[in-house]
Amino acid sequence: MRAKTDVDVAGRNPQTFEEASRLVKHVEGLFMPWDFEGLLAGFTDDCVVRYAEFPEMHGKAELDKFFRGRAARQKEYWLKKDLRLLMGNMIANSWECRWIDTKTHKKMWGWGMEMWTMRDGKIAIWEGTLNFNEEGKRDTGIV
């Protein structure tokens, strides 16, 4: 059973930077270890997800498949999220993560930004960027 924050119990969007920060940290905790039920509970049934190069996803069933696919590929997943912006029903956060790729066994790290459009205390639209590389390699090869 997942712990609830005062934000999601109220069924309303965060109203203050402090409330939004607690929500972001709560979501961070649901990824370590992967709490699929808890993560999905934070999204509206009709959610839309636009995440990096992945095809746009609609609804919790597609999001669940996405989360489980990531979890299967990411051993010893670690995540840190930081609130960057609260404006109306929008929350922006930056994040960084580390994991061991289960196929290549390489240590990986990633970072990015997310925008959440909130509705009734849940994420209705999740838009995110993703940058990743093998740990210790920061050169993208782009000149």
Image (spheres, rainbow, N blue to C red):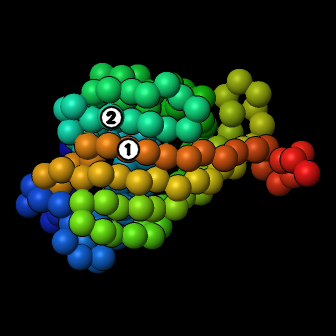
Where does residue 82 sit, x and y in percent of width and height? Answer: 47, 67
- Circle 2 — which element? strand
Residue 9 appears in the picture as rendered: no
Q: Residue at x 69, y 33 (%)?
A: 101
Relative placement, left or right, of 101 versus 24 is right
Taking 41 as reference, is 32 above or below it? below
Question: Does residue 125 lie above or below 88 as drawn?
Answer: above
- Measured along the vertical axis of the image, is residue 21 above or below residue 139? below
Which residue is located at x 39 percent, y 70 percent? 85
Mark 1 / mark 2, whichever is N-terminal: 2
What residue is drawn where x is 32% and y is 43%?
Answer: 125
Separation of disc 1 and disc 2 at Cα? 6 Å
- Residue 142 drawn at (x, y percent): 87, 47
Residue 126, labelled with which disc?
A: 1
Residue 106, numbered circle: none
- Which quarter of the picture shows residue 6? bottom left
Rendered image: mark on residue 48: 2
Amino acid type at circle 1 is: Trp
- Mark 1 touches mark 2? (CB < 8 Å): yes
Q: Which amino acid does the dot numbered 2 rest on?
A: Val
Q: Quick one: label 2, few (<14), some, or many (20+) residues within 10 Å?
A: many
Mark 1 Cα shell of 10 Å, populated few (<14), some (14-19), many (≥20): some
